[in-house]
Image (cartoon, rainbow, N blue to C red):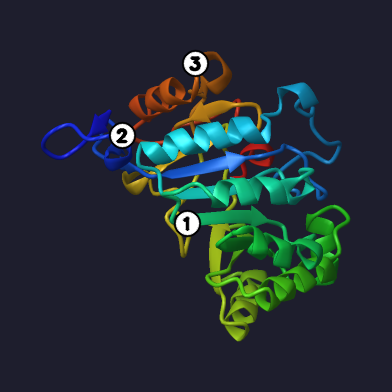
Amino acid sequence: MLRSQGTFREPKACRLFDRFNRSIDYLRVSVTDRCNLRCVYCMPADGVPLVKHDDILSFEEILDVVRVAVDLGVTKVRITGGEPLVRRGILDLVSMLAKVDGIRDLAMTTNGTFLTRFARPLKDAGLHRLNISLDTLSPEKYCEMTRGGDLDDALNGIKAALDAGFAGTKLNCVVENSSSEPDAVAVREFAASLGLEARFIRRMDIENGEFWVVEGGSGGDCRRCNRLRLTSDGLLKPCLFSDISFSYRKLGALEAIMRAVEAKPEAGCSGAQNKFYSLGG
């Protein structure tokens, strides 16, 4: 629903609230389902069926959804993938979104392997923050976990982000059970040595509804969930652990957003149709 204080005001002065009185002010935007890595917890070894090129939202369509969402009260936008930096022209999209009046936090989640090339241009284009995936500091384990990735690419990307002047950069570390595991401890110490914050994400099972609150973040805490998700092919989803979705192309941005907010469940259950590689976690 749309809610405002007192007499009616223009939508930009309003805020979105779901049925459980949670303020919805965060939109995660998946710009691609493609990735240069094949992380074991994200996609199968033989890859996945990719969304057809014609089905992927154009930058203008993404901008349309974001503008309407911001007019309704969204203040935080995060660009995800897949790996968002494999999307051709991604700097143009960042620049377009950075010009939307009302976005207070424009961020991106990335595996970091392309940041030696993109960190400074992303900063110049107007991106505010980065979350960079780093699950281990062992080159052998990194190669195994990503099915062929090079740890140095990620570490050099983190350095490039720091050199570019990004503040508030966080390292996302996926763990089996807890942040006391050796790889997680090493990532925490590495982050601290650089003045960065580490967040620990226990492996989740979307299809079976198994998820936990992110250590160092708010993800997985249904009581405080404030987000909607836009898939790369134009579906507005109110919850990662639900198959509910509304098509932007069929309904338009306003109707799809409003329906997604109204349908947002009190808590996640399961999402057989949702995949980490296409929704960005």
Whether residue 41 is visible here, answered yes or no, is: no
Work out whether mark 1 precedes mark 2 in sequence or the reverse, and give the earlier one.
2
Work out whether mark 3 precedes mark 1 in sequence or the reverse, and give the earlier one.
1
Whether residue 183 is visible here, answered yes or no, is: yes
> Where residue 203 sits: x, y (%)?
59, 50
Residue plotted at (38% across, 45% down):
25
> Where residue 70 sits: x, y (%)?
42, 41
Rendered view: 199 above or below 80: below
Secondary structure at numbered mark 2: helix
Camera-nearest residue between 167 and 238: 167
The amino acid sitting under disc 2 is Pro
Residue 11's mark? 2
Q: Which residue is mark 1?
A: 105
Quarter occupied by residue 152: bottom right
Quarter occupied by residue 255: top left
> Where residue 33 sits: x, y (%)?
72, 37
